[in-house]
C-alpha cells in the first residue's frame, strides 16, 4: 500500500490502467477516448434544424453522455461498471467538501487571472435574475446539465486513466508519480476542451477551468468512483451558476 496516497480509499484501485481486471489493448484505449470526444464535437458543432436552441443543447448533452458509455461498452464490455461504485454517506460528505473547495480555488485562481490577464469571459449559458424567462431558463439548463456534465466526466476521467495506463504499463513509472502527472495533464486537457465556450481565452481555460477540474478529479482519485466526481461537478456548476443568476 506504499504506492497509495494516504487520502485514497484503498479497498479498490483504478480500473483498466494496469491491465486489471483485463488487459486493454492500445487501440481500445483510442476508441475509449475517441467516442466521448466525438460526442463533444457533436455538442459544439451540430445544430439540428427544427429544434429550439434549448432542445439542441439537451440532445447534444445526451449524445455526449451516450457516446462515453458506448465507447466503454465497446472496449471493456461489462467491466464499464467498474467506473461506478456504490455511494455511501461518507461520499456525500466528500461531495459537499469538494464542491466548496472547488468554488474557493476557482475564485482565488479567477481573481489572480483577472489581475494579470484582464476580465474573464462569461459562460454563454449564464442567466441573470430579472431577465425575461430567466427562472424558467435557469431550471431548464440545470436539467440539461444532468446529462451534459455526466458526459463531461468521461472527458476528464478517461484521459486520466489512459495516461495512467501508458506511463504504468509502457514506462513503468511509480504509481504515485503517474497519478500526479495524469491528474494535472488531464485537468489541463479538460480546460482546453472549453476553449470554444470561453471565447478561446486560453489562460482562463487552463488555469480557471483546469484549476477547478483538479478538485473534481481529486474526488475521483480519492474514491475511484465516477459518481462522486460527477456529483461534485454538477453541484459545483449549480452553485456557480446560481450565484451568477442571483448577482
Image (cartoon, grey):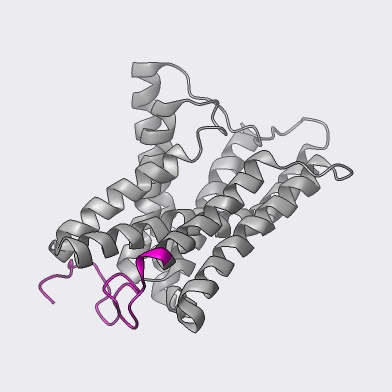
Asked whether the viewer can see residue 182, the reply is: yes
Q: Nearer the viewer, residue 240 or 168?
A: 168
The verdict on residue 174 being magenta is no
Position of 203 relative to 16 (above/below) = above
Q: Nearer the viewer, residue 161 or 131?
A: 161
112 horizontally vs 150: left or right? left
Q: Nearer the viewer, residue 54 or 33?
A: 33
238 horizontally vs 27: left or right? right
Picture coordinates of residue 147, whole percent (x, y): 64, 59
Quarter of the image with the C terminus is top right
Direction right: furthest residue: 50
The verdict on residue 24 being magenta is yes
Q: Residue at x 25, y 69 (%)?
A: 8
Asked whether the viewer can see residue 146, the reply is: no
Residue range (magenta): 1-27
238 horizontally vs 3: left or right? right
Position of 53 relative to 111 (above/below) = below
Direction front: furthest residue: 27
Q: Residue at x 54, y 42 (%)?
A: 240
Picture coordinates of residue 112, whole percent (x, y): 33, 25
Examine the residues drawn in magenta and state their main secondary structure. Answer: loop
Q: Residue at x 57, y 54 (%)?
A: 149
Quarter of the image with the N terminus is bottom left
Quarter assignment of residue 98: bottom left
Q: Residue at x 57, y 34 (%)?
A: 197
Q: Nearer the viewer, residue 85 or 66?
A: 66
Picture coordinates of residue 246, whole percent (x, y): 64, 36
Picture coordinates of residue 59, whole percent (x, y): 74, 54
44 horizontally vs 168: left or right? right
Position of 222 relative to 21 (above/below) = above
Amino acid at each position: 500500500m506504499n504506492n497509495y496516497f494516504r487520502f485514497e480509499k484503498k479497498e479498490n484501485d483504478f480500473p483498466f490502467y494496469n491491465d486489471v481486471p483485463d488487459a486493454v489493448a492500445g487501440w481500445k484505449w483510442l476508441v475509449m477516448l475517441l467516442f466521448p470526444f466525438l460526442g463533444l464535437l457533436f455538442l459544439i458543432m451540430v445544430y439540428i434544424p427544427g429544434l429550439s436552441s434549448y432542445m439542441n443543447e439537451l440532445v447534444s448533452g445526451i449524445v455526449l453522455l451516450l457516446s462515453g458509455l458506448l465507447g466503454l461498452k465497446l472496449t471493456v464490455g461489462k467491466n464499464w461498471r467498474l467506473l461506478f461504485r456504490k455511494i455511501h454517506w461518507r461520499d456525500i460528505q466528500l461531495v459537499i467538501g469538494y464542491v466548496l473547495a472547488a468554488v474557493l480555488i476557482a475564485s482565488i485562481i479567477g481573481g489572480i487571472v483577472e489581475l494579470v490577464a484582464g476580465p474573464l469571459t462569461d459562460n454563454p449559458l449564464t442567466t441573470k435574475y430579472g431577465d425575461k424567462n430567466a427562472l424558467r431558463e435557469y431550471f431548464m439548463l440545470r436539467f440539461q446539465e444532468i446529462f451534459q456534465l455526466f458526459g463531461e466526466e468521461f472527458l476528464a476521467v478517461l484521459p486520466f486513466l489512459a495516461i495512467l495506463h501508458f506511463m504504468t504499463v509502457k514506462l513503468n513509472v511509480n504509481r504515485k508519480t503517474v497519478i500526479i502527472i495524469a491528474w494535472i495533464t488531464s485537468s489541463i486537457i479538460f480546460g482546453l476542451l472549453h476553449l470554444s465556450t470561453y471565447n478561446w481565452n486560453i489562460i482562463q481555460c487552463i488555469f480557471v477551468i483546469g484549476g477547478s477540474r483538479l478538485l473534481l478529479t481529486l474526488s475521483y482519485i480519492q474514491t475511484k468512483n465516477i459518481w462522486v466526481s460527477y456529483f461534485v461537478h454538477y453541484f459545483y456548476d449549480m452553485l456557480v451558476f446560481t450565484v451568477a443568476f442571483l448577482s
